[in-house]
Image (cartoon, coloured by chain):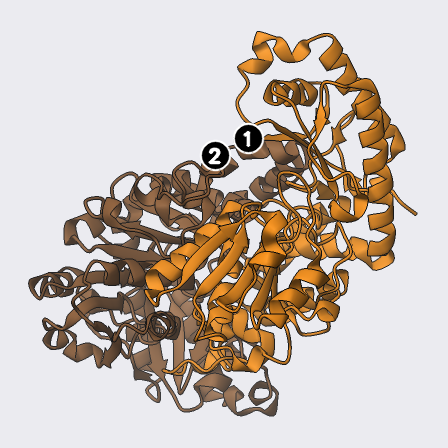
Chain colours: A orange, B brown
């Protein structure tokens, strides 16, 4: 079954180990986008909002995405960017704990989550504080001052994966609200939102879900609390009757209230194609194969490139779908790899990141990538002026 | 020079008078989008962020849009939705007036502006109030309790246009901050942001700027105040060094700080094509021609369809690029018109809206539209079951 390489556009000769940053183009997406542009926008114009279902696309695609993250129907909404969805979730979470002041996160969180939480609480001026601890101290740091625990499930640098069920339980035992960021989880590892009973989750769709650069984000809200949320970003498309143009905001039914403004219809078309790939895939199979590819990569690199140090957890159950190695010359090595057709990326200060996405990668790709890496390291290609001078890949 | 119909895809036989809701597809956009999808995303993958300039597109396109609204270089940023941009602007405006409590708007404002302002101040819990007055009382309502005047320049229902210079001056004389929503202005009427000295402006690009369904919004900030703004939506792409992944947020230079998350790269490609159309157009010429078409429409409708009542200002200097007529059976008439190839739209309770966009409309289109309208009214087509049963066009 896996990989399904023919379902993706992959440049000739490229081994793409950066699906943890931006997934490749699903083969069907180009045609779907073109049809949305030419047949829908071009021919239907304003009537596309009804005729082509543009208006309901964020909810429809939310329901297609939901099973991938263990969520029930009508609990997931697409839209905006991940930063905005973090803001919505933290605001809503704080409103559920008016007597508590701490937003607890960890130093492995992606910076925008911390920035957005901090921007919110600085402007609220209600005495909230953002407390950032080391990820290994997370459970011990959850006490009864904590209103919200805000964590990214899989660390963007090392691939270290939190125990979602255990931390959520600890948060709940302390009376706190749990917000998970699934940026590096959705489409990569098994996530059971309903089972873990977290209140909120957010994520993006351009990494392991392959929906394209700038694809919309998503937000999950546990259905038993949704009706108690009065959204801070109370946009008209989250209104119960957007086209009644009422003077007063009334939140829409359920997760509809977490919509804000006009959805990005063309990006949604790409997302629709990208999600269709999952109709015949099991996330359990994908995860299993990702572990196999990752373990093979770790074993081969450690055997052949002893100057690199594994920066990801060695135990697969503590690791997402990405493997990082530390090396002082990592930046130049990544540049050299890219120029030889193996695309990974680099994060400060010394991390080389490699994503293993079994949808379009197989064992031979892993072996070839290690061959290239070995060649570059043994020939000191990374030390050449041309690679040192290359501009950072963002 | 005008119209430039061959620069747009327009369905055979359709007269499109709804560019005030969603502009048509620019002919070059389909190819531009396809190239962005297939050649950039498909072939360059993650390296597109640098190689294809994706990362800087929101600022680059902000500078292309700026001259259309009388704004200087590096004062306009693309991104998010208009609702989000309203939220950013109102938050920033309030922070500049910490000793004042009133957000003043009018009942002609588009609901999402009021909803977003209200959502913000309800969550801030700092004693702010949203005061909504009749638009004709606007100037008299601006007093020294007012922190922010938040207005949409052109009324979405009637096309009534505020005097931007005069109201901004009144706001400033009372010591208030001015925020203009240009949703129905950008690309339609002459706007001189720098000259009027308003602090903030926001707008969308899918109406008269023809950038497609869900195209990104924009925000303008007066350059002398931008460095004093600490954004509430402090996303990583507004950070001074997004790829340093620092723990603390530091706002980026100038208007860069009003970026939030990952930009919608595919929608940006459509916007880029749409803005290129303006390279050889003068907004003054467009406005002049829009007035001529609108006046012709009003004269012909009043002559031939006396049961309709003009709901827009009669004086062109008080009217945007849209003409509305009131009629109790307006909804059914609009449905009948659409089925006969003349696309306008309807707003509660009884308004038929017609947008006049000289980029793709000429006098013959206006005459043909009135012919169809006259036929429908005289044959009571609007009264037929088939039109009454039609679903609302959003």
Q: Nearer the viewer, residue A8 or A305?
A: A305
Is residue B206 depicted above or below B159 in this figure? above
Q: Quadrant of residue A182?
A: bottom right
Q: Nearer the viewer, residue A214 or B134?
A: A214
Residue B383, placed above or below residue B376: below
Query: Dot 1: few (<14), some (14–19), or many (≥20) neighbours within 10 Å?
Result: few
Residue A56 visible in the shown view: no
Specify the quadrant that holds the N terminus of chain B. Answer: top left
Q: Going by the image, does A319 lie left or right of B285?
A: right
Per the image, label 2 sits on a secondary structure element best described as helix
Q: Residue at x 30, y 74 (%)?
A: B298
Residue A350 image position (x, y, % from top left): 59, 26
Which residue matches tag 1?
A348
The reply to whether discs 2 and 1 touch (Cβ–Cβ < 8 Å) is yes
Q: Which residue is located at x 22 percent, y 81 percent?
A: B134
The residue at the point 20 percent across, 61 percent down is B178
Kindly give the residue lying farthest to the left in the view shown: B173
Establish if A75 lies above or below B330. Answer: above
Query: Seen from this angle, which residue lies furthest right?
Result: A1
Quarter of the figure with residue B390? bottom right
Disc 1 secondary structure class = loop
| Count of residue discs | 2
Q: What chain does mark 2 sit on?
A: B
Q: Which residue is mark 2?
A: B244
Mark 2, other Cα within 10 Å: few <14 / some 14–19 / many ≥20 = few
């Amino acid at each position: 079954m896996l990989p399904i390489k023919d379902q993706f556009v992959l440049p000739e000769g490229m081994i793409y180990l950066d699906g943890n940053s931006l997934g490749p183009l699903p083969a069907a997406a180009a045609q779907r986008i073109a049809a949305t542009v030419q047949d829908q926008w071009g021919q239907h114009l304003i009537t596309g909002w009804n005729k082509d279902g543009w208006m309901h696309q964020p909810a429809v695609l939310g329901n297609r995405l939901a099973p991938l993250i263990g969520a029930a129907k009508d609990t997931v909404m697409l839209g905006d960017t991940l930063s905005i969805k973090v803001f919505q979730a933290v605001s809503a979470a704080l409103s559920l704990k008016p007597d508590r002041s701490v937003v607890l996160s960890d130093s492995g969180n992606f910076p925008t989550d911390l920035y957005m939480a901090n921007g919110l609480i600085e402007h609220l001026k209600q005495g909230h504080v953002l407390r950032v601890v080391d990820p290994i101290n997370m459970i011990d740091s959850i006490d009864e001052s904590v209103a919200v625990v805000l964590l990214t499930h899989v660390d963007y640098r090392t691939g270290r994966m939190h125990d979602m069920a255990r931390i959520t339980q600890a948060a709940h035992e302390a009376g706190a609200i749990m917000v998970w960021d699934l940026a590096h989880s959705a489409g990569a590892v098994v996530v059971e939102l309903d089972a873990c009973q977290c209140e909120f989750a957010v994520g993006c769709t351009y990494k392991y879900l392959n929906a394209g650069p700038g694809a919309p984000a998503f937000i999950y809200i546990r259905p038993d609390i949704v009706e108690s949320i009065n959204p801070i970003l109370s946009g008209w498309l989250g209104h119960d009757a957007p086209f009644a143009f009422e003077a007063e905001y009334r939140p829409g039914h359920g997760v509809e209230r977490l919509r804000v403004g006009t959805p990005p219809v063309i990006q949604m078309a790409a997302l629709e194609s990208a999600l269709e790939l999952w109709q015949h895939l099991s996330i359990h199979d994908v995860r299993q194969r990702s572990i196999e590819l990752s373990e093979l990569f770790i074993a081969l690199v450690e055997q052949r490139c002893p100057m690199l140090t594994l920066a990801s957890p060695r135990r697969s159950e503590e690791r997402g779908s990405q493997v990082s190695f530390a090396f002082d010359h990592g930046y130049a090595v990544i540049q050299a790899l890219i120029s030889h057709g193996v695309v990974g990326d680099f994060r400060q200060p010394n991390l080389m990141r490699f994503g293993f996405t079994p949808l379009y990668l197989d064992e031979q790709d892993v072996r070839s990538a290690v061959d290239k890496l070995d060649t570059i390291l043994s020939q000191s290609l990374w030390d050449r002026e041309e690679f040192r001078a290359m501009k950072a890949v963002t």
